[in-house]
Image (cartoon, grey):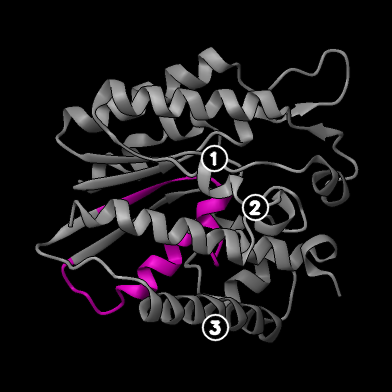
Amino acid sequence: MDYTLQSELYNNIKFNMQKLILDVPGEDALRLGRIFDAKEEEIRKLLDDFEDTIRRQAEEIRGSFDIPQVHESRRIAFIGDSITSDRESFFNIIRKIYEGEERLTWIDAAISGDKSDDARMKLYERTMNHHPDIAHILIGTNDMRENLDEDGESCLSLPEYRRNLEYIVKRLRKEGISVILSTISPVLDEGVGKRFPDDNWVYQGSNIDAVNSIIEETAVKFGAKLNDMREVYGRYRAEEILFQDGLHLNAFGQRLLTEHVLTALGELL
């Protein structure tokens, strides 16, 4: 079965959709089964499969990549949307790589479906109140979603996105928090249309490019570290780095992002 397009249960569990409505532990198969009307055993099988994937990714990266050393205790927040909240994401691979490292504390501030205004309004609840030393931000894809009609326009305008991102980064920097900003990945509308056939969604490549320019400009303006993935992603066809839904990074895309975020983190650990 093509789970990426056909199974809502797969997508609900993979992208931690329960975080949208309930504070439920992500490994609680019984409660997740009740939320998504599925058997506990089916949920557990999916959780185990996702765990196996990130374990393999972590092991492969450990064997082929110079993992940055930890020099002191650090609290690290990851702010983002489903690309970060994904159970097979770069964030979870990094956590697995450093599994057992007691000097690192991970703060999960990523929610599937979030736009920059969501991240802004929940900045204190999800991030600031946990007192991170480092914050990684990857957000903007959902901001640029629009309806394919004459009145479509993106969910948030580019000036609104800039205002939200600048607010988040400014507040973090004012508290002495080191910030890493990663640029967003491309989108394939054909895949989006197959995954969400009833939603009439479309993404404009020019808007994706503009968001990435704003991310770069914001990093410079506030002294944040830019993890610019544009050239990295540009070495491959979009189909090579994206899930079949045309929206999320596949395993290869997540691995590319993992290695570059690790490099950026290395200077801060």
What's under tag 3, amino acid-wise?
Asp
Residue bearing mark 3: 52
Q: Decide: is 91 above or below 227.
A: below
Residue bearing mark 1: 184
For residue 236, the mark is 2
What's under tag 1, amino acid-wise?
Ile
Q: Position of residue 119 (x, y in %)?
A: 45, 35
Residues under labels 1 and 3: Cα distance? 26 Å
Residues under labels 2 and 3: Cα distance? 26 Å
Of 247 and 111, which appears nearest the observer? Answer: 247
Give whichever of discs 1 and 3 has the lower sequence position.
3
Structural crowding at the residue carrying mark 3, measured as other residues with C-alpha within 10 Å and reported as few (<14), some (14–19) or many (≥20): few
Identify the magenta region: 76-103
Say which quadrant the N terminus sits in: bottom right
Of 252 and 180, which appears nearest the observer? Answer: 252
Of 43 and 174, which appears nearest the observer? Answer: 174
- In the image, taking residue 79 as reference, residue 16 lies left or right, namely right
Q: Are marks 2 and 1 in contact (CB under 8 Å)?
A: no
Q: Residue furthest front?
A: 235
